[in-house]
Amino acid sequence: MEGTLEPSASAPDDAPGPPGVPADLLAAGGVRCAVEGAVATVTLARPERRNAQTPETWQALAAIGRALPGTVRVVVLRGEGPSFSAGLDLSRLTPEFIGTLARQDDAALDATLESYQEAFTWWRRPDLVSIASVAGHAVGAGFQLALACDLRVVADDVRFAMRETSLGLVPDLGGTKPLVDCVGYARALEICATGRWIDAKEAQQLGLATLVVPPAELAAATQDLVAAVLAAPRDAVVELKALLQGAGGRSYDEQRSAERAAQIRRLRDLAGLGE
């Protein structure tokens, strides 16, 4: 049983990355990825820019998601330095950049934006549990990247904000759905429309933070959560995640039916009768 293993709770920075992801692609995006056994650690590594993101960052993150080996069960996402991510690198949001995007026809522009979103979508795959380890600022794209993960361990100095509307834009990197799921429509509207700051205490009250700890304890608390997730058999966690992810779109009776179907698969697998 996989639950009897005692793997490392996080991959060291010098562990090998996922095969097939060019080092120059990761370097251009300011991203590192280390894989050790069942754990992959993805690090936003532009601390001099508070880990501000660029389209190259999103290309690198998307490539990591496509290349992760099937042995990985947990992915930890962290930021190097005091801040998780200050959001989009505003030095890239020039009138020329906006004009280049806007002049594309609808299909091409939709495809471009979808390619950016890929960096934010794979974290919720049923075969993975993703944990964001968040300190300092998580703004705009940084907030959305934290929201992309299943769980969020945050330092008590954290400050979340969704600032896209102040730039005349909307959050478009997959963050609106998990935000509404966490806090409800009215609160999500207020958070996005005002762009105000959310501190750690409020984040925990709203369900945005799974756990709040002092900054000095963030790495250890993240490792503890990784180890706890890895203690359960992988197939059970995969079934559980899919069951919970679909719950919001099902009626009570439909969810009970989904529970039964999932349990039938687990029972048969445990009895050696699975396909």
Image (cartoon, helix red, strand yellow):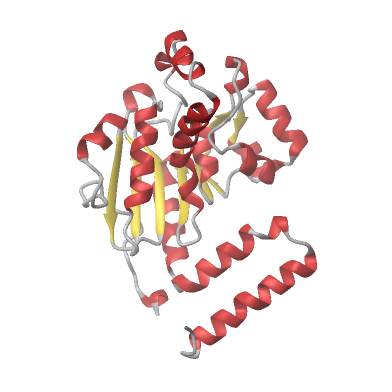
Q: Nearer the viewer, residue 53 or 207?
A: 53
Q: Please count the marks in the image.
A: 0
Query: Can residue 137 be spotted in the picture?
Result: no
Which quadrant of the figure contains the N terminus?
Answer: bottom left
- Which residue is depicted at the point 34% across and 44% down? 63
Q: In the picture shown, does residue 131 fall above or below 109?
A: below
- Which residue is depicted at the point 47% across and 49% down? 123
Q: In the picture shown, does residue 139 fall above or below 69?
A: above
Q: In the picture shown, does residue 224 fall above or below 34?
A: below
| Residue extending farthest top | 95
- Which residue is depicted at the point 41% across and 41% down? 216
Query: Can residue 65 be spotted in the picture?
Result: yes
Q: Position of residue 133 (x, y in %)?
A: 45, 44
Q: In the picture shown, does residue 124 fall above or below 243?
A: above
Give the quadrant of residue 250: bottom right
Q: Nearer the viewer, residue 233 or 153?
A: 233
- Which residue is depicted at the point 65% across and 59% down? 246
Q: Position of residue 130 (x, y in %)?
A: 46, 52
Give the quadrant of residue 209: top right
**Residue 251 placement, left or right of 239:** right
Q: Nearer the viewer, residue 197 or 237?
A: 237
Q: Position of residue 202 (x, y in %)?
A: 66, 37
